[in-house]
């Protein structure tokens, strides 16, 4: 079988193998929620090419598709990422969207980004690859992008109803200088030898993340996410709401999923006044090593989407 071609039966078989190999149920989830990890629970819809797996999935939901419907494609022609950016979706990648009907109000959706990113990363780490998380929603290896996650929601009144978890992963598709493919990292005896096994691992990671999101608290989710965060100690610079240029070092994330940055001023012991009104205006973010600062000052938090953290490989 061609390792670069999607096959629904092969995905189901790989899911069943993963399900049987799981030693225990994580986070105290009950039998009903654990069923989301079984191969027969996923309603798979597999395509070679789509405009967008998220768009196709939402249309399927509108037509009555059940919770845990999965749309998978090997190529997208109109994929999108955070804040509407184009999601490069070249052939021979894995592009996957999962719909979950929560039915009742649960934790804020941003926590699902943290928990599913953590779930997928920990599943891929079983392949012996050092997978990290780049805030807020990228999976990285050796400071190169392996994939990304996009969460979309639908509400009913003030209640969160449907959530779509969109995932794009580089398998053997062409990637830019800042990207990396999983296929290039695998050894000959790797337990993941095809894109179908990658799909199964990804779905298992999403299911684990969903269970975590439903049953664990925000502090615990953020703490485990932080253990894989590659942005710690990264130097960033921005302009605050009054036009003052500030610099700082990333120290982690908080339970709201916001980036925590310790504000510093180079070569000075003077305190910098933190701006607390409104959102900061970002003018720069670099990955260069942080300079030697004499005085730690105060902390600024950035919600997802308010600051962009680049890749080392993108710097000239």
Image: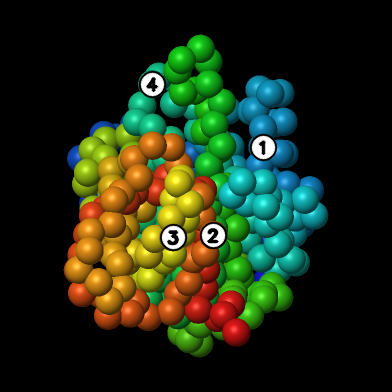
- Measured in 3D between alpha carbons, the distance from the residue under mark 1 to the one under mark 3, in whole angstroms, is 43 Å
Give the residue displayed 49% in from the left and 23% down from the top: 161
Is disc 3 placed on a helix, strand or loop?
strand
Which mark's residue is nearer the viewer, 3 or 2?
Answer: 3
User: Does residue 158 lie above or below 263 as drawn?
Assistant: above
User: On the image, numbered disc 2 is attached to which residue?
Assistant: 283
Give the residue displayed 28% in from the left and 57% down from the top: 272
x and y, in percent, of residue 83 in the image: 61, 46
* In-front residue for pair 277/270: 270
x and y, in percent, of residue 189 in the image: 46, 84
User: Does residue 43 lie above or below 193 as drawn?
Assistant: above
User: On the image, numbered disc 4 is attached to which residue?
Assistant: 105
Which mark's residue is nearer the viewer, 1 or 4?
Answer: 4
Give the mark nearer the N terminus: 3 vs 2: 3
User: On the image, numbered disc 1 is attached to which residue?
Assistant: 57
Give the mark nearer the N terminus: 1 vs 2: 1
Number of numbered labels in the structure image? 4
Q: Residues within 10 Å of mark 3 (few under 14, many from 20)?
A: some
Marks 3 and 2 close (CB-CB < 8 Å): yes
- Measured in 3D between alpha carbons, the distance from the residue under mark 2 to the one under mark 4, in whole angstroms, is 37 Å
- Measured in 3D between alpha carbons, the distance from the residue under mark 3 to the one under mark 2, in whole angstroms, is 9 Å
x and y, in percent, of residue 121 in the image: 40, 62
User: On the image, numbered disc 3 is attached to which residue?
Assistant: 245
Give the residue displayed 59% in from the left and 49% down from the top: 82
Q: Quadrant of the N terminus?
A: bottom right
């Amino acid at each position: 079988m061609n390792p670069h071609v999607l096959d629904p039966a092969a995905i189901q078989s790989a899911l069943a193998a993963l399900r049987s190999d799981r030693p225990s149920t994580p986070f105290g989830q009950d039998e009903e929620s654990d069923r989301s990890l079984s191969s027969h629970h996923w309603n798979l819809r597999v395509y070679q090419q789509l405009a967008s797996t998220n768009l196709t999935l939402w249309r399927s939901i509108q037509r009555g598709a059940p919770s845990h419907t999965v749309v998978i494609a090997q190529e997208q022609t109109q994929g999108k990422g955070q804040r509407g950016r184009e999601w490069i979706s070249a052939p021979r990648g894995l592009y996957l969207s999962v719909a979950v009907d929560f039915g009742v109000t649960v934790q804020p959706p941003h926590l699902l980004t943290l928990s599913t990113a953590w779930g997928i990363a920990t599943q891929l780490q079983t392949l012996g690859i050092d997978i990290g998380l780049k805030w807020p929603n990228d999976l990285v290896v050796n400071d190169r992008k392996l994939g990304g996650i996009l969460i979309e929601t639908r509400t009913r009144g003030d209640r969160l109803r449907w959530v779509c978890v969109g995932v794009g992963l580089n398998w053997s598709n062409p990637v830019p200088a800042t990207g990396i493919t999983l296929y290039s990292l695998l050894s000959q005896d790797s337990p993941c030898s095809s894109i179908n096994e990658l799909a199964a691992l990804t779905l298992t990671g999403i299911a684990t993340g969903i269970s975590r999101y439903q049953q664990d608290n925000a502090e615990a989710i953020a703490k485990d996410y932080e253990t894989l965060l590659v942005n710690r100690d990264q130097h960033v610079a921005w302009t605050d709401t009054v036009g003052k240029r500030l610099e700082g070092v990333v120290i982690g994330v908080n339970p709201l999923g916001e980036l925590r940055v310790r504000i510093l001023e180079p070569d000075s012991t003077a305190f910098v006044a933190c701006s607390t009104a409104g959102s900061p205006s970002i003018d720069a973010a670099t990955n260069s090593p942080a300079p030697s600062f004499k005085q730690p000052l105060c902390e600024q938090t950035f919600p997802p989407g308010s600051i962009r953290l680049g890749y080392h490989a993108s710097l000239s």
